[in-house]
């Protein structure tokens, strides 16, 4: 059994980690922290877990004392993981769900996250945890920077085309997300009356997931950065869960719909958690699951790729557990075969 700790278990990401790991056949959940709820039962904060666990939240311990754990998940606000990771015992494997260790450029981190990075030396140990792209590196690493939810959708939608050298010029990514992506603590733009019957754009030209997408695509194909550019625009939609991406690409040559489909089949045909669908996917098909549904269309000099995923599962906790499975040489799907509902 893998002894696991979740540091930051009261938010939506922590809740999903609990929901998955409580039923993982190789995991013993030994620690769940939440300073503001210390001493409370987990199911008093996450009522969906009632009768499923007797765990109680604990205060954040001294990170150096966690040598009894095999793996820690950091489900904390941006800026906290960089203070904790350098203090963790060397044998503890780390999966960070925040943005603290995704970017290998400290200046970019400061620009998009609004603070100095204080642990760039530790950052060099981290592997970017986009499972289907970096699987082999993840298997060999002890430190994983879990991708952002928008980034996961966009990167998986573009990866086959970029890796094959089939993208030129400007890529336009029209991204839409539900309210859970903003976290459990209410704010002006996540308040229900604001979002319930509304659709609006936000973070124009400054979303923190854009640089990690550019970094990943440049690592896949060195021609990405000099030859391509990305317009990345996110929108709030009146749903709770789900990300839907429409990605507009100008290919380097004219491509038919079948050619695009064959390319995606070549890259993703053996991937259990990626489902290639006819036409458009639907966020209702992926809610509460670790699946990513990808569809596409092609006409003349334009290819459109459509991606749907659950921002809290494949976009956060599910992908984190998928990476843990790889790190500990467990069958990759373990604990993650979570069917969605219909309707």
Image (cartoon, rainbow, N blue to C red):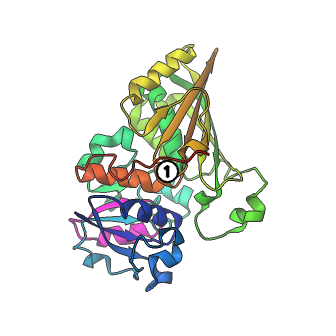
Q: Position of 275 compared to 132: left or right? A: right
Mark 1 nearby-residue class (10 Å; few <14, some 14–19, many ≥20): many
- Estimate the x, y position of residue 67 in percent, counting from the top left: 22, 73
Which residue is at a point 40% across and 34% down the rendered structure image? 220
**Along the line of sight, which residue is nearer the eye, 83 or 135?**
135
Above or below, comparing residue 23 to residue 303 in the picture: below
* Residue under numbered circle 1: 315
252 falls in the magenta region = no
Q: How many marks?
A: 1
- Estimate the x, y position of residue 136 in percent, counting from the top left: 27, 41
Which residue is at a point 45% across and 81% down the rendered structure image? 41
- Estimate the x, y position of residue 73 in percent, counting from the top left: 37, 64
**Along the line of sight, which residue is nearer the eye, 16 or 208?**
16
> Circle 1 sits in a helix, a strand or a loop, which is it?
helix
Above or below, comparing residue 323 to residue 56 in the picture: above
Q: Position of 12 compared to 334: left or right? A: right
- Estimate the x, y position of residue 127 in percent, counting from the top left: 33, 50
Residue 224: in sight, yes or no? yes
Q: Which residues are the magenta region?
A: 79-97
Q: Farthest residue toward the bottom?
A: 39
Q: Position of 223 compared to 296: left or right? A: left
Above or below, comparing residue 174 to residue 15 in the picture: above
Which quadrant is home to the N terminus?
bottom left
Which residue is at a point 43% across and 86% down the rendered structure image? 39
Which residue is at a point 49% across and 82% down the rendered structure image? 37
Above or below, comparing residue 155 to residue 205 in the picture: above
Residue 302: in sight, yes or no? no
């Amino acid at each position: 059994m893998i002894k696991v700790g979740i540091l930051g278990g009261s938010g939506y990401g922590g809740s999903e980690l609990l929901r998955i790991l409580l039923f993982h056949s190789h995991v013993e959940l030994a620690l769940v922290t939440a300073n503001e709820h210390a001493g409370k039962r987990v199911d008093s904060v996450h009522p969906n877990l009632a009768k499923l666990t007797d765990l109680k939240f604990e205060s954040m311990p001294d990170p150096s004392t966690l040598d009894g754990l095999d793996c820690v998940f950091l489900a904390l606000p941006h800026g906290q993981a960089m203070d904790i990771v350098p203090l963790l015992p060397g044998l503890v494997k780390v999966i960070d769900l925040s943005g603290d260790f995704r970017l290998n450029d400290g200046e970019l981190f400061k620009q998009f996250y609004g603070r100095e990075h204080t642990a760039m030396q530790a950052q060099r140990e981290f592997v970017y945890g986009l499972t289907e792209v970096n699987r082999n590196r993840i298997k060999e690493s002890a430190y994983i920077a879990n991708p952002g939810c928008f980034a996961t959708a966009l990167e998986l939608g573009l990866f086959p085309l970029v890796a094959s050298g089939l993208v030129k010029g400007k890529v336009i990514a029209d991204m839409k997300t539900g309210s859970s992506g903003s976290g459990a603590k209410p704010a002006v733009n996540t308040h229900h009356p604001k979002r319930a019957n509304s659709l609006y754009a936000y973070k124009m030209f400054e979303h923190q997931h854009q640089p990690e997408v550019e970094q990943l695509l440049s690592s896949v194909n060195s021609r990405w950065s000099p030859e391509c550019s990305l317009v990345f625009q996110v929108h709030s939609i009146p749903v709770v869960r789900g990300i839907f991406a429409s990605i507009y690409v100008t290919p380097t040559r004219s491509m038919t719909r079948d050619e695009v489909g064959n390319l995606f089949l070549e890259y993703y045909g053996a991937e259990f958690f990626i489902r290639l669908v006819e036409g458009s996917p639907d966020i209702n098909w992926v809610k509460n699951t670790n699946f990513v549904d990808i569809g596409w269309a092609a006409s003349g000099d334009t290819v459109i790729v459509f991606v749907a995923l659950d921002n809290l599962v494949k976009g956060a906790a599910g992908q984190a557990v998928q990476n843990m499975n790889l790190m500990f040489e467990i069958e990759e799907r373990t604990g993650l075969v979570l069917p969605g509902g219909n309707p």
